[in-house]
Image: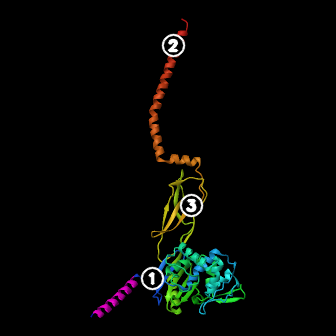
C-alpha cells in the first residue's frame, strides 16, 4: 500500500509538472526533442521569446570558444601573426594540425576556431593574445562579468570538461548577441568552408554547423560536444530584417541538436517583425505662428526602426511643444520631443521639428493681429467712452476762454477810445 502511494504521488507530481510547463509555454512553441536547457532570443533587443531551464549552469563544450573569439577580436588585429604553442591535443580533439612555432594570422586562427572548432587554434589565440593561457582565461572571466553573464565561468579557452567551466543557455545567447556586432564574426560563421592561407601550408576547413550548410536563413554560430556537456549548439538565423539566436544544451545526439535548434530558430523568426515605427517626416501636429492666423506643421526629425513581436502595439506621446512660435526659424528647428513606447518600455525618443521655414512676423502682421483681437476692440471702446466726456469738458473750457478773451479785448478797446 505504501509503495502504491509513493508511485501514485510520483506520477501525479510528474503530470502536474508537465501541465505547468505546458501552461507556461507560448502558443505554438516547439516541443524540444532532448535539450536539457534552451532559449531563443531576438538579437537586436535581447528579448527572450522562449526559455527552458535558461538560467541553469551547465557544461558548454566548445561554445566556450565564443568568448575566446570575443577576447581575441577585442584585443588583437586580424592581420597580427601568432606563433602556435606546443599544444598536445588528444586524438579525439578537433584540430588543424598546427606545429609548434608555426606562424598564422589572427584572421585564420579565428576561422579555424569557429568553423572546425580547432583546439590548437584556440590555444594559439589565447597565448598570442595575452601571453599565457592563465592570463587569457582571467580576461575571459572579466569580459563575462562586464557583459553581465552571471551564470558563466571559464576555466580554459577551449571548452574541455571542467567543473569550473560552465554557462547557461541565456548567457550564451547574450554572448552571441555581443559577438554579432563584429562584421568579421558574422561573415565567418555564415561560411560553409574557408581557406586558411597563412601558416606552413594552405588548409581548407569545413563549418561543423550543418544547419549553415543546409538552411539558407541559418547564419551561425558555434557547435560543441563533450561527454559531459552532450551536444550543444548556439545558432542564429536572419529573415526579413529579423535575427534570432537559439541555444540548446545537453542534447543526446547531433540530430536532436540540429532539429531542436532549427525548430527554435523558425519559431523565433515567425514571432517577430521588423517595422518602421516612426518614419522621418511624419506629421505629428501643428503649432500656431505668433501674430498671425496661421500654423506650421511639426514632423518627426528621424526614422525609428525596431524589431517587435508580431502584433505588438506602439504609442507616441509628444512633449515640449510651445503654444506658438515666431521666426525667423529654419526648416528642421526642434520644437519638441516624440516618445515612442511599447507598453511601459521606451523604444526611442526623436526630435519634433518644423516642417518648413518660419519667417519673422512683419509690422503689418503685428498690427493686424493687434486690431483683430476682440480684447483690443473692447479696450479701444472703453478708452473712447472714457475720453469723450473729457473732450467735451475741454471744449467747453476752450469756448469759455475764448468768450472771456473777447470780452477782455472789447473792454480794453473802450478804455483806449478817447471821449
- Label 2, on which residue? 411
Residue 227: give x, y in percent of width and height.
Answer: 52, 90
Q: CA distance from mark 1 to mark 3?
A: 48 Å
Which residue is at the far right?
Answer: 200
Distance from disc 2 to disc 1, alpha carbons, whole Å, reads 124 Å
Residue 287 % position (x, y): 52, 57
Which of 280 and 201 lies nearest the eye of the viewer? 201
Residue 347: percent from the left, percent from the top? 51, 69
The answer to whether residue 351 is above or below residue 261 is above
User: Would you say the residues marked 1 and 3 are in contact, meaning their CB atoms lie under 8 Å apart?
Assistant: no
* Of labels 1 and 3, the one closer to you: 1
Q: Quadrant of the C terminus?
A: top right
Residue designated by label 3: 353
Q: Few, some or many C-alpha atoms within 10 Å of disc 3 (few <14, some 14-19, many ≥20)?
A: many
Badge 2: few (under 14), some or many (20 or more) residues near its Cα, within 10 Å? few
Q: Which mark is residue 307?
A: none
Q: Looking at the image, which is closer to me, 156 or 302?
A: 156
**Residue in the image at 52% along x and 54% along y:** 324
Residue 399 in view (yes/no):
yes
Based on the picture, tell me whether residue 4 belongs to the magenta stretch.
yes
Considering every residue shown, the one lying at the far left of the view is: 1
Residue 190 seen: no
Q: Which residues are magenta?
A: 2-23
Task: Compare marks 2 and 1 and give the one earlier in the sequence.
Answer: 1
Viewer-proximal residue among 68 and 41: 68
Magenta stretch: includes residue 265: no
Secondary structure under tag 1 reads loop
Question: Percent from the top left, x then y, of residue 356?
Answer: 59, 60
Quadrant occupied by the N terminus: bottom left
Q: Which residue is mark 1?
A: 53
Amino acid at each position: 500500500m505504501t509503495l502504491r502511494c509513493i508511485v501514485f504521488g510520483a506520477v501525479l507530481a510528474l503530470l502536474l509538472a508537465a501541465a505547468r510547463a505546458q501552461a507556461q509555454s507560448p502558443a505554438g512553441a516547439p516541443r524540444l526533442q532532448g535539450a536539457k536547457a534552451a532559449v531563443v532570443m531576438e538579437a537586436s533587443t535581447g528579448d527572450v521569446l522562449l526559455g527552458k531551464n535558461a538560467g541553469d549552469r551547465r557544461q558548454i563544450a566548445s561554445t566556450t570558444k565564443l568568448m575566446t573569439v570575443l577576447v581575441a577580436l577585442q584585443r588583437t588585429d586580424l592581420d597580427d601573426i601568432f606563433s602556435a604553442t606546443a599544444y598536445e591535443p588528444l586524438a579525439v580533439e578537433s584540430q588543424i594540425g598546427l606545429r609548434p612555432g608555426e606562424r598564422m594570422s589572427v584572421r585564420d586562427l579565428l576561422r579555424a576556431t569557429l568553423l572546425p572548432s580547432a583546439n590548437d587554434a584556440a590555444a594559439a589565440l589565447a597565448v598570442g593574445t595575452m601571453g599565457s593561457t592563465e592570463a587569457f582565461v582571467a580576461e575571459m572571466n572579466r569580459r563575462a562579468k562586464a557583459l553581465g553573464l552571471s551564470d558563466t565561468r571559464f576555466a580554459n579557452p577551449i571548452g574541455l570538461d571542467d567543473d569550473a567551466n560552465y554557462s547557461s543557455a541565456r548567457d550564451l545567447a547574450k554572448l552571441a548577441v555581443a559577438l554579432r556586432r563584429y562584421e568579421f564574426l558574422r561573415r565567418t560563421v555564415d561560411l560553409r568552408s574557408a581557406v586558411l592561407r597563412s601558416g606552413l601550408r594552405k588548409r581548407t576547413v569545413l563549418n561543423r554547423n550543418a544547419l549553415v550548410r543546409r538552411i539558407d536563413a541559418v547564419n551561425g554560430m558555434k557547435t560543441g560536444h563533450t561527454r559531459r556537456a552532450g551536444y550543444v549548439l548556439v545558432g542564429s538565423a536572419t529573415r526579413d530584417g529579423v535575427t534570432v539566436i537559439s541555444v540548446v544544451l545537453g542534447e543526446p545526439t547531433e540530430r536532436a541538436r540540429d532539429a531542436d535548434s532549427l525548430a527554435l530558430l523558425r519559431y523565433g523568426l515567425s514571432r517577430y517583425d521588423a517595422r518602421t515605427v516612426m518614419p522621418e517626416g511624419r506629421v505629428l501636429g501643428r503649432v500656431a505662428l505668433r501674430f498671425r492666423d496661421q500654423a506650421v506643421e511639426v514632423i518627426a526629425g528621424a526614422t525609428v526602426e525596431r524589431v517587435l513581436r508580431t502584433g505588438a502595439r506602439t504609442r507616441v506621446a509628444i512633449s515640449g511643444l510651445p503654444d506658438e512660435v515666431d521666426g525667423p526659424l529654419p526648416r528642421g528647428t526642434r520644437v519638441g520631443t516624440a516618445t515612442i513606447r511599447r507598453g511601459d518600455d521606451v523604444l526611442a525618443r526623436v526630435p519634433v521639428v518644423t516642417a518648413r521655414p518660419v519667417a519673422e512676423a512683419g509690422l503689418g502682421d503685428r498690427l493686424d493681429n493687434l486690431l483683430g483681437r476682440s480684447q483690443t476692440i473692447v479696450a479701444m471702446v472703453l478708452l473712447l467712452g472714457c475720453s469723450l466726456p473729457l473732450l467735451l469738458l475741454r471744449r467747453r473750457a476752450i469756448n469759455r476762454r475764448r468768450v472771456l478773451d473777447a470780452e477782455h479785448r472789447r473792454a480794453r478797446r473802450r478804455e483806449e477810445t478817447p471821449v
